[in-house]
Image: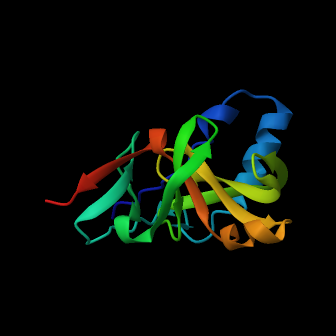
Amino acid sequence: FFFFLMIRRPPRSTLDRSSAASDVYKRQVSTQSTWEEMGRLYVDYLDSGRIYVCTQCRIHISDRSELISRNFHGRHGKAYLMNKVINTYLGPVEEKMLMTGLHRVCDLFCCNCDTLLGWKYEEAYEESEKYKEGKFIIERATVIKTTKN
């Protein structure tokens, strides 16, 4: 019998041995229940023709049909507003002052390579921004549009 044990490494941003970094990693690990079971990475694949994939590891992130708007800006430039994403996990909820006001958001990471892809809107305090709640911002610099062969 062969027995393989897959151990998930901490995100690149927490590779130093400081206690603050390990505390951040512990908080992130607690949010990863939907895509990792018993140390084994669970990955979804999309069957549609046009998909967005992570620039670092090429894992599927979202389908073109989930795109709501291209007219958003992220930390590093242009971004997409998406209805649904896959193969990702969320960081802790934080209140952030964004260009459109105060929001409660979670950072969004690739489940395979831990790349910061964008964020999820958990709550918008202004009535005109409520439509964003539960939606995802994916920075264009972190994904590639591709077609399935």
**Of residues 78 and 44, the one drawn nearer to the viewer in this rendering:** 78
> Please, is residue 56 above or below residue 123 in the view?
above
Reply above or below: 43 against 24.
below
Q: Which residue is drawn at 78% across and 40% down?
A: 22
Coordinates of residue 50 in the picture (x, y in percent): 27, 62
Hey, which residue is sitting farthest front in the picture? 128
Furthest-left residue in view? 149
Q: How is the image coloured?
A: rainbow
Give the residue at x 58% y 71%.
Answer: 34
Side of 37 where 144 appears, left or right: left
Residue 115 showing in the rendered view: no
Residue 94 placement, left or right of 81: right
Q: Measuring from the top left, give residue 98's x and y in whole percent.
A: 77, 47
Report the number of discs: 0
Q: Quadrant of residue 20?
A: top right
- How far from the left and from the top, in percent, is residue 59? 37, 53
Residue 12 place in picture, x, y as percent: 60, 34
In the image, 36 versus 125, the foreground residue is 125
Which quarter of the rendering shows the N terminus?
Answer: bottom left
Q: Is residue 33 left or right of residue 149?
A: right
Looking at this view, is 60 or 24 the one in front? Answer: 60
Is residue 21 visible in this depiction of the protein? yes
Camera-side residue of 132 and 120: 132
In percent of the image, x 69 and y 34: which residue is there?
Answer: 14
In the displayed structure, would residue 88 be above or below residue 97?
A: below
Image quarter of the C terminus: bottom left
